[in-house]
Image: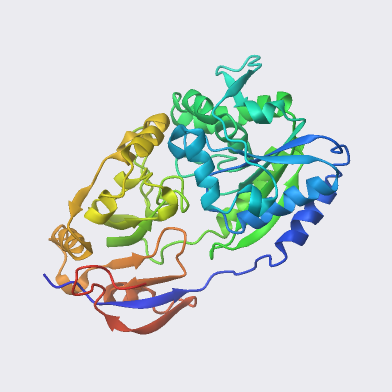
Amino acid sequence: MDIPKMVRIRQTFDDRHITDIEGVVREQMENLRLDTLKGASVAVAVGSRGIANLDRIVRSAVLYIKQLGGSPFIVPAMGSHGGATAEGQKRLLEGYGITEELVGAPVRSSMQVVELPQDDLENRVYMDKNAYEADAVIVINRIKIHTDFHGPTESGLLKMCVIGLGKHKQALEIHKYGVYGLRELIPKTARQVLKYGKIIAGIGIVENAYDRTMLIEALRPSEFESGEKKLLDISRANMPSLPVSKLDILVVDRMGKNISGTGIDTNIIGRIRINSEKEPEAPDIKNIVISDITEESHGNAVGVGLGDFITRKLFEKIDFKATYENVITSAFIERGKIPLIADNDRQALEYALRMCRSVVADRIKMIRIKDSLHLSEMYVTFPVLEEIRDKANIEVVGEFVDITEPSGELISF
């Protein structure tokens, strides 16, 4: 079967970003006037996402705490990720350059939690034991649209306070309520953590469409909700997207936990795969092929069920224990189901093309992307190019080419 030739295109987005990461982190933390940290132990909560410049941001925060006379240490704040083990979570941080040698503070990884007062909240409240026993806690996270739900606050500091710092036990507690738990209970639970958990500051990060650090803002606990809402609006306005709303086939070179909590950002592909949630109207993609998984995922392939076809090389890299723990904790099991497995990329494309029976071969609308985080460059078939070539932010790069090698693998991106 002939695979349609594709041409590389470039999308242009707003590229405003911060170059002096260290200077901005210091300036923002100075604004909070954290002058009471002399002699204090300070837990710095860091999550499992692949955030641009995360190591530089964490290192800068650690340095500033030390200059104030504090004794900082790193706490993994990532719920059930890393196989819900202390070793696995520490290993995830190491993959992002978060080690004692690189950021200047020890990593204290544990799954032990303490229970905080529940008051009149319907769910129980937990917090990482090491963080709770510190004199103060600072939370660092990216603010972005969530992959499971939409609301006034989504993925950011509040979620980090709850699902992240609450470890596996809090993740199970919140997820047992389904999407209601995420949308309604995370903000309420975060208020309890902020009330009893000695959190003194949060560093919110916004990235632009090129996965570059666009904004860093340090917030006091009383500012978490209002500040996160503002930053979420900025993040939403600067989120990349596919250039068309309807596709026959989307080819994704790689999925991964460092790319999205669901491996592939559901907002980009228009698939949520949560039984209680309505699927987005756009983009409408008939078939999704996933070629590989990132090394930084350590085999956690949660989100693989968002695809229709995968390759054997991806399948053989899956750590089912880590994947299933993440999937079952979330209770969104559709995302953990295994799609059809092809021997190689070419066969996966052929399978997807055979599912486009009602489409004339030379009218196939197909896009190939590196991953759902990097959408500035992609390959498109001629029908897609016809639809987008007049857009001001689109540039054609090169000529139409075959996208698979004789070996059956995709050509280099």
Report if residue 311 is visible in the image. Answer: no
> Which quadrant of the figure contains the N terminus?
bottom left
- In the rendered image, residue 216, in percent from the top left (x then y), is placed at 70, 55
339 sits to left or right of 182: left
Occupied quadrant, residue 157? top right
Q: Is residue 326 above or below residue 15?
A: above
Q: Residue at x 25, y 43 (%)?
A: 338
User: Nearest the camera: 227 or 321?
Assistant: 321
100 sits to left or right of 296: right
Q: Residue at x 59, y 40 (%)?
A: 152
Q: Is residue 298 above or below residue 111?
A: below
- In the rendered image, residue 202, in percent from the top left (x then y), is placed at 71, 42
Q: Is residue 201 above or below residue 402?
A: above
Occupied quadrant, residue 20? bottom right
- In the rendered image, residue 303, in percent from the top left (x then y), is placed at 36, 45
95 sits to left or right of 290: right
- In the rendered image, residue 109, in percent from the top left (x then y), is placed at 58, 35
User: Nearest the camera: 175 or 255?
Assistant: 255
Report if residue 387 is visible in the image. Answer: yes
Q: Is residue 68 above or below residue 18?
A: above
